[in-house]
Amino acid sequence: MSKSLNRFRLAGAVLAAGAGLLLGSGLATAAPASVPSLAAPSTADVNGAHAAATTPSVQATAGRFLAGAGKAGIAPNATVTPKMGRTVAVYYLNPAFVTATSASVPVATQAFLATEATAPDGTKASVWTARQGNAWVEVNIASGDTEFVYADKANAVSGKAFYEPQIHAWYALSGDKVVALNSDATKAIGAQSVSVAEYQHIVNVRYADKMPNTPYGKNHMIGGINTEPGVAGTPRMIAAAAPAQPAGSDPTLIVVLGTVAGIGVIGGAAFYARKRHA
């Protein structure tokens, strides 16, 4: 799994997509009586996403990405022929779950579908696809195979993987339990697993005061990104609100357009994502 991480910020369209889910009032109360499962994509959607990720143009882009085209000492036209593998659904923490008062609100929602790409030397990348209108399109290519590693780990505990991007934590939803899949998740919940009700309490405490209808949100500081009107260009990352950058990472700020509704969780919080292709 690649350790190369880039911090990226979210464009306003994504911020709006996430923020719009968080306009409820009050804190979460009673624990859900039953836990909704994470909705699986239809066969048609998986096939559509896989087809979008394996078009000749996308494979060519993935080939250049895997070859490191344009990096120091590597020719700008360097390329490899990637082997395209399986396509999996990727789920992110559901903003509505943070303040949910209903048992019907799922813990996570589908953010995008990812298709594995492998270079002849074994280097891996993940091609992200999302629906735009009636079509599936490629929206990002990221280094490593994170989505697939955690999908497999979750499957091993009879669950589905989901991501809390603000703290780089991966979990599995397995029945009525949230199971930590990486060290960040274990640190976040203080145990290997907790009930869904306990997890909701944890994220409610962590994020409820950062909703758009709170002073924090109204002061244009949603999720650590300044969204104040009149600021030139895309929203500005607030350094104090951003998590510490991993050693050896590239500080480049990548703008992800609003094509992946659901990435803008908790109103578009700052988080790390693996390097996106240019």
Image (cartoon, rainbow, N blue to C red):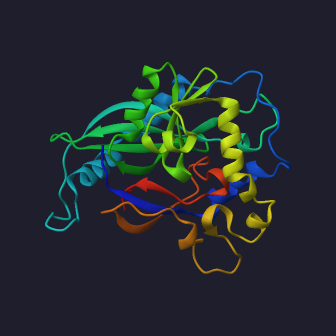
Q: Position of residue 179 (x, y in %)?
A: 53, 30
Left or right relative to 11: residue 141 = left
Q: Is residue 95 visible?
A: no
Q: Residue reaching furthest right? A: 25
Image vertical order of residue 207 relative to residue 251, above or below: above
Identify which residue is drawn at 79% across, 66% down. Answer: 215
In this view, the residue in front, 126 or 196, is 196
In this view, the residue in front, 238 or 148, is 238
Which of the image's four quarters has the N terminus?
top left
Left or right relative to 61: residue 258 = right
**How many numbered markers are drawn?**
0
Q: Position of residue 83 (x, y in %)?
A: 25, 36
In this view, the residue in front, 120 or 184, is 184
Q: Position of residue 152 (x, y in %)?
A: 40, 27
Left or right relative to 112: residue 228 = right
Q: Is residue 192 visible?
A: yes
Q: Residue reaching furthest front? A: 190
| Residue 10 location, quadrant | bottom right
Which of the image's four quarters has the C terminus?
bottom left
Identify which residue is drawn at 42% across, 38% down. Answer: 147
Left or right relative to 134: residue 187 = left
Q: Position of residue 253 (x, y in %)?
A: 45, 68
| Residue 235 location, quadrant | bottom right
Identify which residue is drawn at 77% across, 44% down. Answer: 99
